[in-house]
């Protein structure tokens, strides 16, 4: 039968490597990604009769081209197309950690959320409504404590089930970036779609967003592609000028604001509650 490839991703210190070790035990190997010094940790886990290949991706806060780690992580996802990504988050800083998760959702890769460090959450007196979060994000959400192995079995089983259900289908969510950026993003995505610019690897709207964020890797692909790159550059320059002149900001800053706004709109729907008392004591 087919071997499933599953990637572990998340912010640094979310507990990825601890979870990776808990899942794979001694069945692991360490290498490097081609051309860079970033460590590549791979391991195997058996679920029932199935063999699962797990990659522990470098920790990242975003999916930009600013750092080698972020480029390695996103290049791995788009080029190797693992069957699913498990986003390991520190559940005690859920909103901050979901910033990366939202970008996986925009990329469209099948995603499972591991709410790690649930021991810390319980101690703090905070409560997370996992079912509600799963419903709102439209993906499996599993509570874990990587340090003790709590939830690891459920996590990998659910990842396998979900990976098989999605069967390699990527579906990206489209969030609003407001009245200034949305129309331009639509125009750019239309152009990208029409010209089939990198659309075998990335969703058109995602590429448009990367252009607006000034992503050097995607821009260099466009520059090599000629006309489409020139047109996209012009569109970005125009919206940059508009943002500077009328709002004294940049498209990049607006994009970050709307991402945090989207995350807050999710977590405010009763996902995070606290029994105030305990929180005050701690
Ligand atoms: P990575 O950077 O995402 O690979 O994170 P690590 O696996 O290296 O973990 C970062 C730190 O968090 C380590 O000190 C771990 O022991 C700790 N840690 C990992 N998982 C948990 C957990 O579920 N609960 C608690 N309290 N600590 C954890
Ligand atoms: Mg690690
Ligand atoms: K910790």
Image: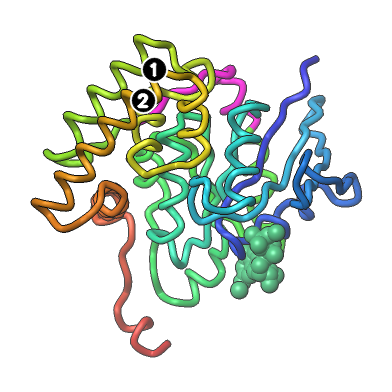
Dot 1: element:
helix
Q: Is residue 93 left or right of residue 231?
A: right
Residue at x 52%, y 18% (from the top left corner) = 169
Pick whichever, 267 or 155, lies toward us. Answer: 267
Mark 2 CB in 8 Å range of ligand 1? Answer: no
Please identify the quadrant where the C terminus is shown.
Answer: bottom left
Residue 170, compared with residue 75, is above or below; it is above
Q: Is residue 55 left or right of residue 94?
A: right
According to the picture, the residue beneath numbered tag 1 turns out to be 227
Residue at x 54%, y 64% (from the top left corner) = 118
Q: Quadrant of residue 175?
A: top left
Label 2 with label 1: CB-CB less than 8 Å: yes
Pick whichever, 51 or 214, lies toward us. Answer: 214
Magenta highlight on residue 251: no
Residue at x 68%, y 35% (from the top left corner) = 6
According to the picture, the residue beneath numbered tag 2 turns out to be 230
Query: Percent position (x, y) of residue 252?
Result: 31, 49
Query: Percent position (x, y) of residue 211?
Result: 37, 36
Residue 117, compared with residue 204, is above or below; it is below
Query: In the displayed image of the protein, which residue is found farthest to the bottom?
Result: 281
Query: Percent position (x, y) of residue 241?
Result: 18, 45
Magenta highlight on residue 169: yes
Residue 28, compared with residue 272, is above or below; it is above
Residue 147 appears in the rendering: no
Q: What stretch is highlighted in magenta?
A: 160-173
Dot 2: element:
helix
Q: Is residue 248 left or right of residue 236?
A: left
Give how far apart the Cα atoms at labels 2 and 1 are: 5 Å
Residue at x 55%, y 49% (from the top left corner) = 114
């Amino acid at each position: 039968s087919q071997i499933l490839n599953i990637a572990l991703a998340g912010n640094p210190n979310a507990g990825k490597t601890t979870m990776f070790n808990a899942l794979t035990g001694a069945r692991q190997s360490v290498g490097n990604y081609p051309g860079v010094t970033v460590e590549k940790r791979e391991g195997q886990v058996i679920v029932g009769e199935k063999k699962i290949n797990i990659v522990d991706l470098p920790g990242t806060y975003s999916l930009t081209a600013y750092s080698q780690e972020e480029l390695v992580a996103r290049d791995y996802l788009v080029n190797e197309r693992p069957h699913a990504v498990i986003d390991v988050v520190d559940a005690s800083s859920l909103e901050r950690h979901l910033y990366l998760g939202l970008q996986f959702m925009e990329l469209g890769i099948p995603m499972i959320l591991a709410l790690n460090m649930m021991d810390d959450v319980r101690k703090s007196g905070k409560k997370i409504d996992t079912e509600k979060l799963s419903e709102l994000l439209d993906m499996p959400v599993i509570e874990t404590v990587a340090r003790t192995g709590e939830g690891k079995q459920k996590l990998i089983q659910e990842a396998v089930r979900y990976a098989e259900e999605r069967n390699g289908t990527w579906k990206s969510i489209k969030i609003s970036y407001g009245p200034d950026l949305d129309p331009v993003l639509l125009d750019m995505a239309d152009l990208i779609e029409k010209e089939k610019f990198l659309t075998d690897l990335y969703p058109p709207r995602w590429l448009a967003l990367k252009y607006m964020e000034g992503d050097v890797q995607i821009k260099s692909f466009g520059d090599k592609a000629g006309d489409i790159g020139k047109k996209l550059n012009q569109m970005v320059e125009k919206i940059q000028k508009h943002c500077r002149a009328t709002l004294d900001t940049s498209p990049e800053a607006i994009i970050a604001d709307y991402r945090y706004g989207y995350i807050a709109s999710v977590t405010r729907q009763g996902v995070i509650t606290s029994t105030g008392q305990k929180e005050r004591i701690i």
